[in-house]
Image (cartoon, rainbow, N blue to C red):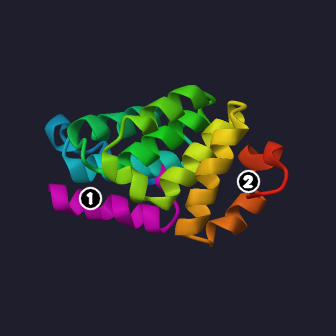
Amino acid sequence: MDFDGTINAAIGWLELDLPEDALRELAFLDPRQRMRRQALEIKLFAEMKAGRWNAGADTGRLLCLREPKEPRFFIHAAFCLHETGDTAAARNWLLTGPSELIEDPIFHYNIACYHCVLGESGRARSHLKRAFAMDDQLRQLAATDKDLATLGDLP
């Protein structure tokens, strides 16, 4: 199968909520094709959906290095790092992202979670306020987010 066919098949597996099958599909690509941005993005999504946090962190950071101006790769890589239990690395990685992140409510929400887990409640509250100001729907998510549980009342 050609590159496009393999990519479409992997996307199909993801649409069926079968991330392991998507990853197996991507394995049919030759090594050079596996390093193409589209293949790496699908791989990252499949790894995240499968809960393969270490692999996702590696794929996410590779995408960040290859596409340093793409904010969402930094958000995804940091989230994967956080899910591995390395919240300090997640916070630090996210802070290395492009300046456009400052305009993204998910950046502020996630960094608030990382600060909270690391015991930095003042910083967490500040970023959470900014996230809510940018997207008030994040309040619903925050109400049940275990990472924010130690904050008590939300800002």
In x, y percent, where is residue 17? Answer: 52, 63
Q: CA distance from mark 2 to mark 1?
A: 34 Å
Q: Quadrant of residue 113?
A: top right
Disc 1 marks which amino acid?
A: Ile
Main SS category, magenta section: helix
Q: Is residue 46 left or right of residue 66?
A: right
Q: Which residue is mark 1?
A: 7
Query: Which range of residues does the magenta coloring cover?
Result: 1-20
Neighbour tally class for label 1: few under 14, some 14-19, many 20 plus, Cα within 10 Å: many
Q: Quadrant of residue 82?
A: top right
Q: Mark 2, mark 1: which one is toward the viewer?
A: 2
Q: Which residue is mark 2?
A: 145
Sequence-wise, the earlier of marks 2 and 1 is 1
Does the magenta segment cover residue 10? yes
Q: Is residue 33 visible?
A: yes
Picture residue at 73% right of the left edge, 31% below the top: 119
Neighbour tally class for label 2: few under 14, some 14-19, many 20 plus, Cα within 10 Å: few
Helix or strand or loop: what does disc 2 sit on?
loop
Picture residue at 43% right of the left edge, 36% below the top: 95
